[in-house]
């Protein structure tokens, strides 16, 4: 189990929010990734399908997560991701690492990374690679916050 202290002296697992923004109803991949993260010892909050940017940011703030995974297949990533990141900043949680997966054309990857998404995982990405990236990113954030 991957666990570290969050200021209380207790060891707690990393908390990750997995969300499906927009009208996309395809959630098999999100559920597979959520299961892999749980199997790796992380606490996972899955918001379900058809979430607004505001709902995702609010859930992340409320659940005190340390990473966010967005799964999208609708093609609306260039519209929705900036709105999610802005909603996070408005709630004071703009420093939480955000990762994305799903059907995202290669031509859009530079823009997504430029907006602040730390990693993008397309179809066929090994689950171990996703787990490692999220664990490494969240652990690094804990270290910078001295948690």
Image (cartoon, grey):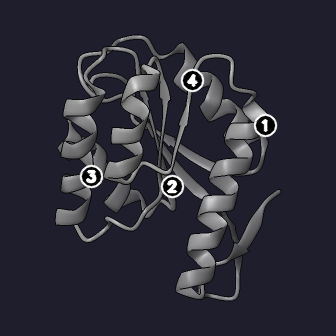
Residue placed under numbered mark 4 in the picture:
122
* C-alpha gap between disc 1 and disc 2: 16 Å
Instruction: Decide which of tag 3 and tag 2 comes sooner along the chain.
Output: 2
* C-alpha gap between disc 3 and disc 4: 20 Å
Instruction: Decide which of tag 2 and tag 4 comes sooner along the chain.
Output: 2
Residue placed under numbered mark 1 in the picture:
128
Residue placed under numbered mark 2 in the picture:
67
Give the SS element for disc 2.
Answer: strand
Q: Nearer the viewer, residue 104 or 102?
A: 104
Q: Residues within 10 Å of mark 3 (few under 14, many from 20)?
A: many
Instruction: Decide which of tag 4 and tag 1 comes sooner along the chain.
Output: 4
Quadrant in the picture for the N terminus: bottom right
* C-alpha gap between disc 2 and disc 4: 18 Å
Q: Is residue 6 visible?
A: no
Residue drawn at x 75%, y 66% is 3
Residue placed under numbered mark 3 in the picture:
85
* C-alpha gap between disc 4 and disc 1: 13 Å
Instruction: Decide which of tag 1 and tag 2 comes sooner along the chain.
Output: 2
Is 145 situated left or right of 62 in this image? right
Outermost residue, right side: 1
């Amino acid at each position: 189990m991957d666990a570290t202290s969050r200021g209380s002296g207790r060891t707690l697992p990393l908390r990750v929010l997995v969300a499906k923004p927009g009208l996309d109803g395809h959630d098999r991949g999100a559920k597979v990734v959520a299961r892999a993260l749980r199997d790796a010892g992380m606490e996972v909050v899955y918001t379900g399908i058809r979430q607004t940017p505001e709902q995702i940011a609010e859930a992340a703030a409320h659940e005190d997560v340390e990473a966010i995974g967005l799964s999208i297949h609708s093609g609306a990533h260039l519209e929705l991701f900036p709105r999610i990141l802005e909603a996070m900043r408005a709630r004071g949680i703009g420093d939480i690492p955000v990762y994305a997966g799903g059907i995202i054309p290669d031509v859009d990857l530079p823009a997504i990374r430029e907006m602040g998404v730390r990693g993008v995982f397309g179809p066929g990405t090994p689950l171990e690679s996703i787990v490692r990236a999220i664990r490494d990113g969240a652990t690094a954030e804990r270290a910078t916050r001295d948690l």
